Image: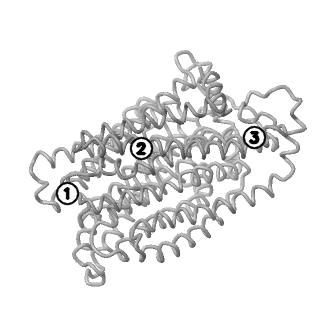
């Protein structure tokens, strides 16, 4: 079956001419199932094959991102230039999250897929041309206005005028990146709708590679002796990475005949409904992104001296590595399944799937969080201990990493619960709870930043607000799904469903969930202690020195942790091990 052949979706005769936000949400679930079926039936392509491509590209991007951060720390350390760069980069990153990878992608992909299923290529090009034009003109205008505003505001209004001057210079180079990266995100979503996953998945890795090439150029050209000029070159490399991502994806877009010149077909139904669906998502995403920006501004204003923003930013980037591989992955994978259960009103299956997924998250997140916390200092010294990094700043950044680890299981479960609300088509409740959590976070940050924790107070504030967010989500969802646990137990005699994470609950399996969580926590504590002991003995007791020796001790500690956690889990017959193995067998 050709990927480009129009396919008539089930239920196309009902409401096919009218696109609504509710219809878009429902279609996104159905389309995901159809895409999986088509991939299984299509020769040469399978679900596991596509998953391996995307997962491999994501891992490559994370790995290159880590190399990029190591090079930045070696070149610039925890300097005032890096403080100004990180704050400046947060601004285009905010717009990228809002209009690139966030609301635009979520709202556009279901609409685009419906257009493709109808086989109306002319309408698809009108839609893409109009969306691209609106993005380019709108974001271009915002870029000009923001840059002009930063130069019109007197530098003397700020507590550190020299650092503000660096900020607006870096922002002037970085902000145009927004236009290209958001257009590239629209291209990536479009290619995914046409079952082209490889190249879009590789784009973040390509962007990191361009950034790394810029850093290598700075290293070899001698510009590192001029920090301000070097950071300007790095900012230009970031801008170039956005242009490269946009340019590379023009090739497959042209092959699919989806490239259109500038258009303003505002009467096209998909345009109107896309922006209607985007509105609530934009609001929710804006809350989090503005909060992230405010965290860095507060760290700059309330923590004396230079390096607070850099310390928190380096630690946060390190924390994102396990977060993306643990919580976000399972939440994203479960979303289509939970959406299908909600659409069919099979709430007992949704509840069973939710509880089993939460147990799996605990099994994976606890060792990741406690292991990273135990090795926070040696890992920070290994990655960021360059010639321009002071020992005090490395210790401060390690403390941020350790306190951020408290949030890893919390944020992972929040992601799963939020997806559950979305599956139930309730977008308001998570947003309202998130607003309250953000207010608590800002209040906690203002207080904690002025204590001896300094920028590590941001990490503790994140954990406090995250715990509140989690508690409120659980409370509301428990009321919403009241009685479904008993329904799932009554369904225990039904033959096993194909969705293994949604197997009907029994009294014994229900009792085993809190036991599993506590067992995972206890085993993770033993693993963390063992990992710390191995690293400590190798590096300190044996008198090792240098980053090479540190790398060996950290690697040995990580391997010891994996062996301890896996061995104890098998010895204690943790059901999660068998569950993961079963899921892998089903994929194969």
Q: Quadrant of the rendered structure where residue 334 is? A: top right
Which is nearer the N-term, disc 1 or disc 2?
1
Which label sits in the foreground, 2 or 3? 2
Which is nearer the N-term, disc 2 or disc 3?
3
Q: Secondary structure at mark 1?
A: loop
Quarter occupied by the C terminus: top right
Residue under numbered circle 2: 533
Q: Residue at x 46, y 28 (%)?
A: 53
Which is nearer the N-term, disc 3 or disc 1?
1
Q: How far apart, in angstroms, are the residues tagged by discs 2 and 3?
A: 31 Å
- What x and y, as percent, mark residue 158? 30, 81
550 displayed left or right of 430: left
- What x and y, as percent, mark residue 483? 87, 50
Q: How far apart, in angstroms, are the residues tagged by discs 1 and 2?
A: 29 Å
Return the residue nearer the eye: 520 or 468: 520
152 displayed left or right of 506: left
Q: Is residue 246 visible?
A: no
Q: Residue 172, labelled with which disc?
A: none
Density class for disc 1 (Cα within 10 Å; few <14, some 14-19, many ≥20) is: some
Which label sits in the foreground, 3 or 1? 3
In the image, farthest residue toward the top = 43
- What x and y, as percent, mark residue 485? 83, 45
Residue under numbered circle 3: 512
Q: Residue 388, labelled with which disc?
A: 1
372 displayed left or right of 326: left
């Amino acid at each position: 079956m050709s990927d480009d052949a129009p396919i008539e979706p089930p239920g196309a005769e009902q409401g096919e001419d009218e696109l609504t936000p509710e219809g878009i949400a429902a279609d996104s679930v159905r389309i995901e199932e159809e895409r999986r079926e088509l991939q299984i039936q299509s020769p040469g392509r399978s679900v596991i094959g596509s998953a391996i491509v995307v997962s491999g590209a994501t891992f490559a991007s994370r790995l290159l991102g880590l190399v990029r951060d190591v090079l930045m720390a070696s070149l610039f350390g925890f300097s005032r230039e890096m403080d100004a760069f990180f704050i400046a980069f947060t601004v285009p990153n905010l717009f990228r999250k809002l209009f690139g990878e966030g609301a635009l992608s979520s709202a556009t992909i279901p609409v685009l897929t419906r257009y493709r299923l109808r086989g109306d290529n002319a309408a698809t090009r009108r839609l893409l041309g109009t969306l691209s034009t609106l993005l380019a003109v709108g974001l271009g205008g915002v870029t000009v206005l923001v840059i002009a505003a930063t130069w019109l505001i007197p530098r003397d209004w700020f507590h550190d005028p020299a650092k503000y001057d660096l900020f607006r210079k870096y922002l002037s180079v970085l902000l145009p990146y927004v236009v290209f990266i958001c257009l590239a995100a629209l291209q990536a979503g479009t290619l995914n709708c046409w079952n082209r996953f490889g190249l879009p998945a590789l784009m973040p890795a390509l962007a990191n590679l361009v950034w790394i090439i810029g850093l290598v150029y700075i290293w070899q050209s001698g510009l590192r002796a001029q920090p301000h000029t070097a950071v300007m070159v790095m900012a230009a490399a970031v801008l170039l990475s956005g242009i490269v991502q946009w340019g590379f994806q023009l090739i497959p877009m042209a092959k699919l005949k989806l490239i259109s010149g500038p258009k303003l077909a505002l009467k096209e139904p998909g345009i109107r409904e896309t922006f209607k669906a985007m509105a609530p998502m934009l609001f929710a995403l804006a809350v989090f992104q503005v909060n992230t920006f405010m965290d860095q501004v507060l760290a700059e204003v309330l923590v004396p001296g230079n390096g607070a923003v850099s310390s928190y930013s380096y630690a946060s980037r390190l924390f994102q590595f396990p977060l993306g591989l643990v919580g976000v992955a399972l939440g994203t994978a479960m979303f289509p399944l939970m959406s299908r259960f909600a659409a069919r009103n099979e709430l007992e299956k949704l509840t069973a799937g939710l509880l089993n997924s939460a147990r799996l998250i605990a099994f994976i997140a606890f060792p990741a969080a406690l292991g990273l916390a135990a090795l926070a200092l040696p890992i920070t010294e290994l990655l960021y201990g360059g010639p321009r990094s002071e020992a005090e700043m490395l210790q401060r950044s390690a403390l941020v990493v350790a306190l951020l680890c408290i949030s890893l299981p919390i944020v992972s479960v929040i992601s799963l619960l939020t997806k559950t609300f979305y599956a139930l088509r309730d977008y308001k409740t998570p947003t309202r709870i998130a607003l309250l959590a953000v207010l608590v976070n800002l209040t906690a940050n203002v207080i904690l930043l002025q204590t001896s924790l300094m920028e590590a107070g941001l990490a503790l504030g994140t954990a406090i607000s995250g715990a509140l967010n989690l508690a409120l989500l659980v409370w509301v969802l428990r009321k919403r799904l009241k009685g479904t646990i008993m329904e799932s137990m009554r369904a225990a005699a039904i033959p096993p469903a194909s969705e293994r994470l949604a197997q009907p609950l029994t009294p014994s399996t229900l009792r085993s969930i809190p036991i599993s969580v506590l067992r995972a926590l206890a085993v993770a504590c033993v693993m963390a202690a063992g990992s710390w002991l191995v690293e400590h003995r190798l590096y300190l007791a044996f008198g090792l020195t240098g980053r090479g020796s540190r790398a060996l001790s950290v690697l040995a500690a990580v391997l010891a942790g994996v062996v301890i956690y896996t061995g104890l889990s098998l010895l204690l017959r943790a059901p999660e091990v068998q569950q993961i193995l079963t899921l892998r067998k089903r994929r194969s």
